[in-house]
Amino acid sequence: MSDNGKVEPLSSRLMKMVIVGHVDHGKSTLVGRLMSDTDSLPTGKLDFVKDICTRQGKEFEFAFLLDALEEEQDQGITIDTSQIFFNTKKRRYVIIDAPGHKEFLKNMVTGAANAESALLLIDAYEGVQEQSRRHGYILKLLGLTQVAVVINKMDLVDYDPEVYYKIKSEYTEFLESLGVQAQEYIPVSAKLGINIAKTGDEMSWYKGPSVLQMLDQFEEEKTPVHLPFRFPVQDVYKFDERRIIAGRVESGTVKVGDELIFSPSNKSGVIKTIEAWSVENQPETAEASQSIGFTLTEQIFAERGDVAALKTELPIISTTFDVNVFWMGKRHLEKGRSYTLKLTTQEVTCEVVGFKKVVDASTLETLEDQDYLAKNDVAEVTLRTTRPVAFDLFGSIPTTGRFVLVDEYDVCGGGIITTYTPSKTDRLRDEIRHRDFHWLKSDIKPEERAYRNGHQSALILIVGPSGTGKAKLARHLEHKLFELNYQSYLLDGRNVALGVSADIESQHKKQEGEVVRRFGEVAKLFLDAGHVVISTSNVFNQEDHSDLRLLVEPCPVVEIFVTDDEEPEGNFEIKLSQAETEKEIEAANTVYKYLKDKKILTGHNYSI
Amino acid sequence: MDHLDELENQSIFILREAYKNFKNLAMLWSIGKDSTVLVWLARKAFFGHCPVPLVHIDTSFKIPAMIKYRDEFAKKWGLNLVVGGNQKALDEGMNHEKGRLVCCEALKTMGLQAIMEERGYTGLMLGIRRDEEGTRAKERYFSPRDKNFEWNFKDQPPELWDQFKTSFSPETHIRIHPILHWTELNVWEYIHREKIPIIDLYFANAEGKRYRSLGCEPCTVPIDSKARNVEEVIAELKDTTSAERSGRAQDQENTYAMQKLRARGYM
Ligand SMILES: Nc1nc2c(ncn2[C@@H]2O[C@H](COP(=O)(O)OP(=O)(O)O)[C@@H](O)[C@H]2O)c(=O)[nH]1
Ligand SMILES: [Mg+2]
């Protein structure tokens, strides 16, 4: 089909390239020039724009080919990023023209985040400017390291190699401090079309590629099929008899028959089919970047936000991690405020617990003692989420190691997860995860036990200061449930300490974590047997209670907090005053009602 | 994966994000090739189903064959079709002779506005593409419109790593553009691969004319062409250098016509 001189591009893959740099350094001009010099413009487009310029008494600008908005042409600046398509002999391109003005950084980020290679423009006459550096920094943060630098407007400095070398060495030093190496520094005149699509005699001292040749040297980003399998659940569909778990494979590959673990819930399931509509053959496998859907051999409760992975290569689950962020919000990023973290398909409330380093992105200067992040700057911060999230470090799996922050309705920041130090809870969670994988399930299903017993298993924790009547209530509650033919058992922490934990020496007593773990594991066994386990405790603190919740997951936990505090802090299901607790009959009734309401006590469906 | 798979996978991802995040979502179906591909992609994304209503804004000036095609496929594919329009303006004699931009705004933009208000849609999916013209090249996948339907193109939300703007204040709505990243050629290549039935106005008739872009009869001019089927259209497009929308009169009306129309809620 190339008989009229047009050559079919060699590769049908699209190279996504962004052009960044300081305002007025010639980005839009360069793109317009590239389009026009490679005959990529639609017929009449050039004349059309030239005609507008004459009519409006303006000098023709190649930039007007992209800056299509009236305001852009009036002010001669790019306000928003444009994406245009063009071909070389080698392949097809989409070129993303990003605005260079500081005001429009979020538009630059939008453009750059979608690219796999970048040209960074520097005006030879003005030299390295604020946005030249900021954009360099942001490219690095976005993980875009395939970069060539273009030194433009060489016509304004008489094509002087001295100017070129000076800028080259200054900017090389800057990029080095970021750990980035530009592939080339190309001296050009975008306006005059020198070293863009063709080379000229003006700069015979430069032996490197033209811009067009450079583009063809960039390498296409590989889809991450070789990395561990990650599948964030996007949605679950039940349009017909199939229950399809839909989402996109972010990395790795998967096949029918694979066992998947869903994080953070730790549920597991085996892929029964990979579904697809209007295809010749039903797929048996799927790989990174495919939007797919599958059914499982067993119905489990999976929902949007869960990340499916293979058992041998699970993601990290935590609530606290260190990140690098850049900020685009009008309001500062600061401590004490809540933001929404969007990571893969997970959405969770988070806050900044510490600013480790705040950097002025245009100078790389550290802003000492600053504990907020202003628009256009970057920082290393520690984030804490209200619920555990499943993620990877950006360095290991980029697509599950990056996120955005939403302030009210707007996406205001973006970032990557750099490091993570497991907390005590994280280690416990990891241990539990492994315990659950190897747990031998009884042939009697939990539902069967629940049917027989007239209730689900549940853990009831009665907590609060000592001397408030907790023990009396616990005893009464155990008895009341027993009388009603329920399987209740009061598990006393002391009894566990006397036996199971008897080997914990006094010097280890401080190591409370182990005491809690053993108590929780014992409770877990009773819960597995289908009981309602009741416990009171003065020795366990708030943190221990959340560890206990973790240990017995997914079993429901009912925490009864005995306190006279009007607005007590913490995570509990029922609050009782001391006076209420002391009337143990009424108090036990309150708990009983709650258990019925929550359908933990369902009642016997048969008579004995 | 080839480039069509890549485009398809990205579009499906966006369709599913839209479906998950908007309780009251609709899709605009102009009967043209782009929105028909969008309907097809929805059926891919939702495994043979199209769980959102399809809104068609009927200006009454559409080419009759379009209405016939619309009704045929709505039935065949089991689509939930919702037809909107601006009857009041028509009763008052609105047509393109009152001015093309005035007419487009009255019959299309206001017709759309009315049906959205009536049905309470907060998300609207459209088959526009970046390569169609300059202002569309600057669009987002998820693009907010304020309560007056206006597009604030000077202050668009950042869009990175496929995290889209899905939260918005009441009274505003979001336009979702799942095939924004496709080109005209991609659309035809995909129609070819998937064997999507496309209205035959796109193919050359006995007089050697075909429509490259479909709209209202008085404002859409067919081009000279010999392309009588999908393969021939693809071959023709690979050779042409003229713009896709050059047959659409409203684009040529004045210098920033499309910007003005679109800023006020046009598709
Ligand atoms: N002399 C000269 N002027 C240039 C060159 N490239 C761009 N310009 C001018 O620099 C100004 C800013 O260009 P523009 O492309 O809008 O810059 P952007 O803000 O980086 O997109 C315009 O007036 C251009 O004509 C060049 O190579 N030489
Ligand atoms: Mg520009």
Image (spheres, grey):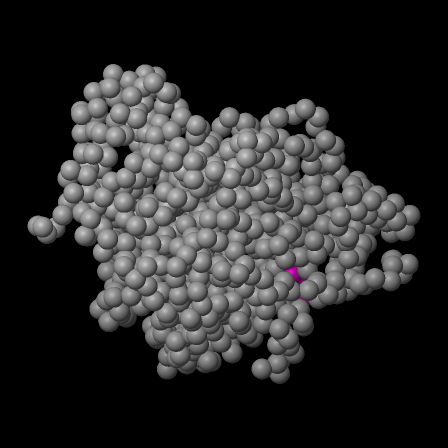
User: Which residue is most to the left?
Assistant: A607
Q: Position of residue A35 (x, y in %)?
A: 65, 61
Residue nearest the viewer, comparing B98 with A512: A512
From what the image shows, is residue B219 above or below residue A495? below
Residue nearest the viewer, comparing B77 with A257: A257
Segment colored magenta? A35-39
Total numbered labels placed on residues in the image: 0
- Residue A356 picture quarter: top right
Residue nearest the viewer, comparing B30 with B124: B124
Residue A271 visible: yes
Which SS type dominates the magenta stretch? helix
From what the image shows, is residue A276 above or below residue A32? below
Residue A48 visible: no
Q: Is residue A399 left or right of residue A136?
A: left
- Residue A489 picture quarter: top left
Q: Position of residue A339 (x, y in %)?
A: 48, 34
Q: Position of residue B78 (x, y in %)?
A: 23, 66
At x 31%, y 32%, the residue is: A573
Q: Position of residue A457 (x, y in %)?
A: 28, 45
At x 60%, y 43%, the residue is: A420
Residue A548 in the magenta stretch? The answer is no
At x 39%, y 59%, the residue is: A440
Q: Is residue A400 left or right of residue B44?
A: right
